Amino acid sequence: MLDVQTLANIASILGVAITIGGFALTLVRIRKSQTAVEDVKEQIRNLNAIQEVAAAIKSLDEIRKLHRAKSWTVLPDRYTSLKHQLIAIKERTSISQKQRSSIREAIQQLSTMEAQVESTLFGGTDDLAVDRMNEITSGLIDDLAAVLVDLQNEIDVLRH
Amino acid sequence: MVEEKVGQLIKVILEKTKAREVAWKKTSNKRQFLTVFPKYVVSVEGPDYSPTFRLHNEKGETIDEITIPSLSSAAQEELKELLLVARRQASGGEEAVDELLRTLSEKK
């Protein structure tokens, strides 16, 4: 027969074990909820990035049309505006190194176009080749479209 | 001092380009080619006899520009060669030559 003291000790040990178990369970629940919150935040960041990249693709498409129309005077502002959009995407979004590299290239290509157009507008000797400019612009659209697909895939992975 | 370091950088980029570890891209300027690194972009611009080497930051701004006269004679030759190799790689000429050589060697 167990005496009262032993029973009290066993009850005390069980109480501690239950408390620790409960605490561990709470920690696991908190951890799961934190992970879920982070996943949702990541999804929201990616959704915003998708919208911004889609807007950048639209701007590039407009630039391509402006090249065809040879609207050189309005183009420098368009290049600058789009560069700012791309810099913001690169700074704000948690994108991969490959995606970052595509955006960095786009920024530099736009800077080159801007320098060429400015040089021509202010009497430089650059001859602007619309076909080449649009070949580069189309390449940038393709690269950003690939970034868009990657971001969409990342959201799909987070959802499942 | 800066020119000496840029000379070393040109040499390394040339070696990496030959080893196809660096990929060059065409730009809207037919004489200019660029390659993207983490944080920086490098461009080279002709003419062939006197190329210019530029370093750009993430905003597309030029942060350093080196022309042929400021380089040592060895670095001058390396920069000229870099422009040629970059152009060949960016235009796909190098790939075409390799493919043709492969095809012709298979037919033997």
Image (cartoon, coloured by chain):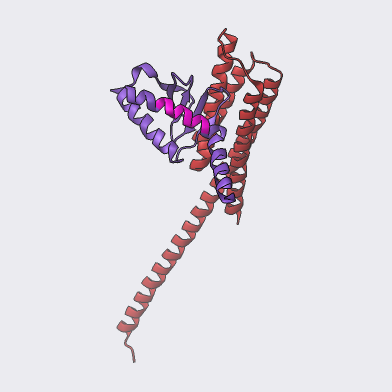
In this picture, is A148 found above or below A39?
above
**Residue A114: x %, y % from top left:** 56, 19
Question: B12 and A91: which one is in front?
Answer: B12
Q: Quadrant of residue B99?
A: top right
Q: Is residue B81 magenta?
A: yes
Residue A9 in view, yes or no:
yes
Point 67% across, 31% down: residue: A58
**Is residue A75 shown above or below B84?**
above
Placement of the N terminus of chain A among the 4 image quadrants: bottom left
Residue toward you, A45 or A6 = A45
Q: Position of residue B83 (x, y in %)?
A: 46, 27
Q: Quadrant of the C terminus of chain A?
A: bottom right
Q: From the viewer's perspective, is residue B50 above or below residue A17?
A: above
Q: Main secondary structure of the magenta part?
A: helix
Is A63 situated left or right of B64 in this image? right
Please, which residue is most extreme toward the left here?
A: B1
Identify the residue at image location x=39%, y=68%: A20
Chain letter for the part of the structure drawn in purple: B
Residue for point 43% across, 31% down: B40
Residue B36 picture location, percent across and down: 47, 34
Quarter-of-image position of residue A47: top right
Chain in red, by letter, is: A
Residue range (magenta): B79-88
Residue B44 position in % (x across, y down): 46, 25
